[in-house]
Image: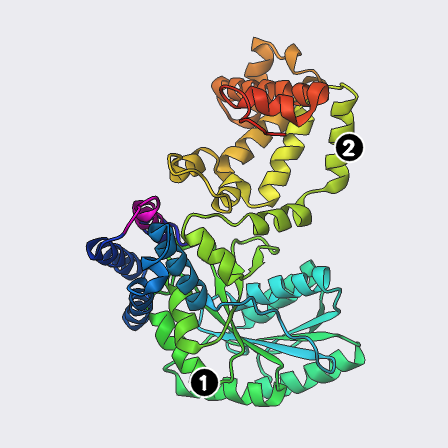
Amino acid sequence: MFDNLSDRLTQAAKNLTGRGRLSDANIKDTLRQVRLALLEADVALPVVKAFIERIRERAVGDEVGKSLTPGQALVKIIHGELVTLLGSATVELDLRAQPPVVIMLVGLQGAGKTTTAAKLALRLIKKESKRVMMVSVDVHRPAAILQLETLANEVGALYCSSEASEAPTAIVARALDESRRSHADVLIVDTAGRLHVDEDMMDEVKAVHDAATPHETLFVIDSMAGQDAVNSARAFGERLPLTGIVLTKADGDAKGGVALSVREVTGKPIRFLGVGEKIDALEVFHPDRMASRILGMGDVLSLVEEIEEKVDRAQADKLAKKIRKGRGFDLSDLRDQLEQMMNMGGMAAMLEKLPLPGKINQAALKSKTDEKQLKRQIAIINSMTVGERRFPKTINGSRKRRIAGGCGMQIQDVNRLLKQHLQMEKMMKKMARGGMKKMLRGMVPGGLPPGFG
């Protein structure tokens, strides 16, 4: 998400950084680049105008003029205004109410409400230790009811059944009663998708809202909806007391303009980002961290949190002990590492959160480390025998042909994997003999920087 915008704004920031002084021409040119970048990212025109004007007011003042590093001061202003545009502070779900706390999801057709309901339920169950019940009031699409029931079973949530022949308000009343009797902490209500111009459907969702009296009403919107997202957000905001926004399919949107527009137009905080098809692919939205990512500064905090959450600590400790004892880093260990990387969304997802130096082409790096490549490498290892994984040096030409045929790859693919494993094994041995310092000395040309511990 924000790839195109990030590239343009990062370049504008680089042009400023390191300058001893800024002229009016410098500032004007930078603001023009920022304006074009935002418009190309599908940010609504009124939002762009207001954003640029706020930067201009601060840029011509003492904040930049009296700074020892005016270029960096202007980049800091742009970062600060991005944070403000995205919502300033992280807003968590408010669950401080008499159970069951009702969370209602509303939005357009195809926005991803049903999948988001399941992702949200899983998050509340795993992270908040809540007992969650789910119910669908989408009587216009019977498949949605069946889909939610299937997802509820998958994430371990309670489910209140419903029929297409029932009235949505009656379903909600029964779900509230069942959730109380089941001692559920949270009730998630998945509503039917609707067009914001369909008055009958909008009246229906208003009636469901009145019956459910939700503590949180979240507007779910497709990140790739473009300018229409702004109109629909405004229409829903006028009919319902929205408390937050969930942006879905953020991993497939290179522009990111919807995030910047919807927050400004509705005045409601973005709560979550849907970042993939997997049931756990839901991230809390942090405005400050997202602003840093847009300007190419990375988001190391989110990466650390993700590693702590998704990396198998017991497996990591087992590998560390194995290496300390001098036992080899075999292909089974490599497969475990690749699978853990897959659980984190692949190398591309990790690269988005790292502040890479300007000379590194992030797009080219991502293309070489995509999810398909990880899957191919895992398939090659799975095509090997237990003995071959344990002792890679026994893999000769005939074995390579058998392995390649077993996973539908070429012998060259097998050779590349074995070379990659050999490099990692050497690195692990360096760690075992002399720790991280020796490993880094081998990786960094010319040795470690002075004073590096």
| Rendering coords of residue 291 (x, y %) | 45, 57
Q: Which quadrant would the C terminus be assigned to in this image?
A: top right
Q: Which residue is mark 1?
A: 202
Task: Residue at 69%, 24% (x, y): give it.
Answer: 435
Q: Is residue 371 magenta?
A: no
Estimate how packed mark 2 is, as few (under 14), some (14 to 19) or many (20 or more) residues with alpha carbons within 10 Å. Answer: few
Closer to the camera in the image, 202 or 449: 449
Q: Is residue 241 left or right of residue 384?
A: left
| Rendering coords of residue 396 (x, y %) | 60, 9
Task: Residue at 56%, 86% (x, y): give it.
Answer: 209
Q: Is residue 16 magenta?
A: yes
| 304 over 324 or under it: above or below | below
Q: Is residue 229 left or right of residue 425?
A: left
> Disc number at residue 278?
none
Q: Which residue is mark 2?
A: 318
Residue numbers of the magenta segment: 10-21
Of all residues, the one furthest to the left in this rendering is: 25
Task: Residue at 47%, 43% (x, y): give it.
Answer: 355
